[in-house]
Image (cartoon, grey):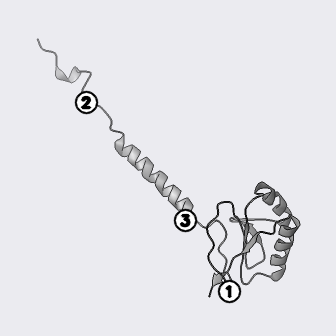
């Protein structure tokens, strides 16, 4: 007598992982691109300058921002002027980009520049928009 076919151990239960791997790679690509295009600092309304020109992107550049209220930010987190030397010690090389809102009090700009110079940093880029 012949054995029933439904009791065979090999009945084609293979799982194809190719679509799953494709989805994982697409998600990875999405997050890499989303991180690349995101702004590293707080959005500020930059002042206009006739001599402003675009600089090349530098991964070693430390980006700081001062908002309209005069608060200093590193990325999106507020930063006290007293904490600036510790942040600069983590990145001893590379320029510092300072983005100051056009409505920010001048005292905040001078305080940040004074702290940068006290830490020995003279390679400061001040961001502006071109006319």
Q: Horizontally, is 6 left or right of 40 in the view?
A: left
The image quarter containing residue 75 is bottom right
Q: Residues within 10 Å of mark 3 (few under 14, many from 20)?
A: few
Count up the numbered dots.
3
**Can you give x and y, in whole percent of width and height, for residue 77 in the image?**
72, 64
Looking at the image, do the residues carrying marks 2 and 1 touch, with CB atoms under 8 Å apart?
no
Compared to 96, does 14 lie above or below?
above
Marks 1 and 3, Cα distance to the nearest angstrom?
Answer: 25 Å
Q: Horizontally, is 4 left or right of 39 in the view?
A: left
- Name the residue that disc number 1 marks: 49
Q: Mark 1 falls on what kind of element?
A: strand
- Name the residue that disc number 3 marks: 37
Res. 12 mark: 2
Res. 104 mark: none
**Can you give x and y, in whole percent of width and height, for residue 13 in the image?**
29, 31
- The residue sitting at 82% across, 77% down in the picture is 108
Upstream in the sequence, badge 2 or badge 1?
Answer: 2
- The residue sitting at 82% across, 66% down in the picture is 121
The image quarter containing residue 39 is bottom right
Looking at the image, do the residues carrying marks 3 and 2 touch, with CB atoms under 8 Å apart?
no
């Amino acid at each position: 007598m012949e054995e029933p076919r439904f009791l065979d151990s090999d009945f084609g239960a293979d799982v194809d992982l190719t679509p799953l791997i494709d989805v994982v790679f697409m998600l990875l690509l999405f997050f890499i691109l989303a991180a690349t295009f995101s702004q590293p600092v707080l959005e500020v309304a930059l002042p206009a300058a006739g001599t402003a020109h675009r600089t090349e992107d530098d991964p070693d550049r430390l980006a700081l921002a001062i908002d309209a209220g005069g608060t200093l930010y590193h990325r999106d987190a507020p930063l006290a002027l007293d904490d600036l030397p510790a942040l600069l010690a983590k990145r001893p090389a590379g320029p510092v980009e300072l983005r100051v809102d056009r409505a920010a009090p001048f005292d905040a700009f001078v305080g940040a520049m004074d702290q940068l110079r006290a830490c020995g940093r003279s390679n400061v880029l001040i961001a502006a928009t071109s006319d």
